[in-house]
Image (cartoon, grey):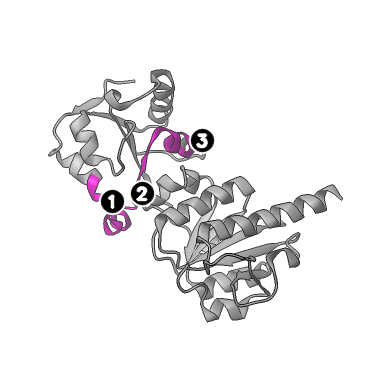
């Protein structure tokens, strides 16, 4: 591997260009996003992501053997490796306490029509979810639960938001994800014969009272507004998660996890019967 380029100044144009990728407009224009962190980059590489450039700061790295492995894998894929001084890296990094890894990768840009589904899909639809952290948390759950695809319907944020990537621990590159309008998402579900279960407090049906064992999609909306009338009217079932406390809603990522794992429970029961 050739000796990496070294950048020491936080004012270097390449460092400024890295910082610019925190803005959605720049990500959309360039078709690039950032993956920060050893764990996130490791998972992205294992998911088949090919970084364009890997910026490293040896001073911030932990286990040198593990660090060298990830750097070597990225370099073998053709990534340019650039060393940054600590001040330059901290200028480019978007999180506190960086660990010395920051990669520029192609952004995730798919529509529903680009997704390949198995015969018995479990799909999560997130309608207009605003917070990147919630999207990322739902992706981690989707990865753990073996979800076939996650669709952002009428998305407010993008899959390439660095905070989504971070909150997902890199699973945004491992779970098939797409962004599309609500109408297009609903048409896609109908075309694939996938019934839709909508999460809403305005129903008497609890989430354990519907059949999750076949092809199914579950939709969750914003914590403030919930799902739109368009999506609720299109749903085959409306379900609620029982709540006995004083709060009137759960965090959307928590709700998604409860619903997805009810599907996992029922599917495992079917497989074992």
Nearer the observer: mark 1 or 3; the answer is: 1
Helix, strand or loop: magenta stretch? helix
The location of residue 62, given as percent across then percent down, is 37, 24
Question: Splitting the image into 4 quarters, where does residue 59 fall?
Answer: top left
The location of residue 42, given as percent across then percent down, is 46, 33
Label drawn at residue 22: 1
Residue 26 among magenta residues: yes
Among numbered discs 2 and 1, the one appearing first in the sequence: 1
Q: Which residue is mark 2?
A: 162
Res 230 seen here: yes
For label 2, the SS is helix
Question: Splitting the image into 4 quarters, where does residue 258 fall?
Answer: bottom right
Q: Is residue 170 above or below residue 219?
A: above
Residue 172 among magenta residues: no
Mark 1 crowdedness (10 Å alpha carbons): few <14, some 14-19, many ≥20: some
Residue found at the very far right of the displayed protein: 273
Circles 3, 2 touching at the beta carbon (< 8 Å): no
Q: Which residues are magenta?
A: 19-44
What whole-number distance in Å separates the C-alpha atoms at marks 3 and 2?
19 Å
Label drawn at residue 272: none
Q: Nearer the viewer, residue 44 or 167?
A: 167
Query: Residue at the spot x=57%, y=50% of the render?
Result: 141
Quick check: 29 left or right of 235?
Answer: left
The location of residue 220, given as percent across then percent down, is 55, 66
Q: Is residue 224 above or below residue 262?
A: below
Q: Which residue is mark 3?
A: 46
């Amino acid at each position: 591997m050739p000796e990496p380029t070294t950048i020491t100044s936080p004012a270097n144009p390449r460092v400024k260009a890295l910082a610019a990728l925190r803005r959605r407009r720049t990500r959309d224009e360039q078709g690039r996003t950032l993956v920060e962190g050893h764990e996130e980059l490791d998972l992205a590489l294992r998911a088949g992501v090919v970084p364009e450039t890997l910026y490293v700061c040896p001073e911030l790295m932990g286990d040198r053997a593990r660090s060298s492995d990830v750097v070597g894998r990225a370099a073998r894929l053709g990534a340019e490796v650039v060393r940054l001084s600590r001040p330059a890296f901290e200028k480019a990094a978007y999180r506190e306490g960086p660990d010395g890894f920051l990669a520029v990768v192609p952004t995730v840009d798919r529509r529903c029509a680009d997704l390949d589904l198995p015969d018995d899909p479990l799909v999560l639809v997130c309608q207009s979810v605003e917070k990147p952290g919630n999207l990322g948390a739902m992706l981690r759950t989707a990865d753990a639960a073996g979800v076939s695809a996650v669709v952002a319907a009428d998305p407010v944020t993008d899959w390439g938001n660095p905070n989504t990537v971070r909150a997902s621990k890199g699973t945004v590159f491992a779970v098939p994800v797409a962004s599309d309008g609500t109408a297009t998402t609903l048409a896609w579900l109908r075309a694939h014969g996938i019934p839709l279960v909508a999460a809403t407090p305005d129903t008497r049906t609890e989430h354990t009272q519907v059949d999750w064992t076949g092809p199914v999609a579950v939709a969750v909306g914003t914590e403030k507004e919930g799902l739109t009338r368009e999506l609720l009217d299109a749903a085959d079932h409306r379900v609620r998660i029982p709540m006995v406390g004083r709060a009137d809603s759960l965090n959307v990522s928590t709700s998604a996890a409860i619903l997805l794992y009810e599907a996992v429970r029922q599917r495992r029961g079917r497989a074992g019967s």
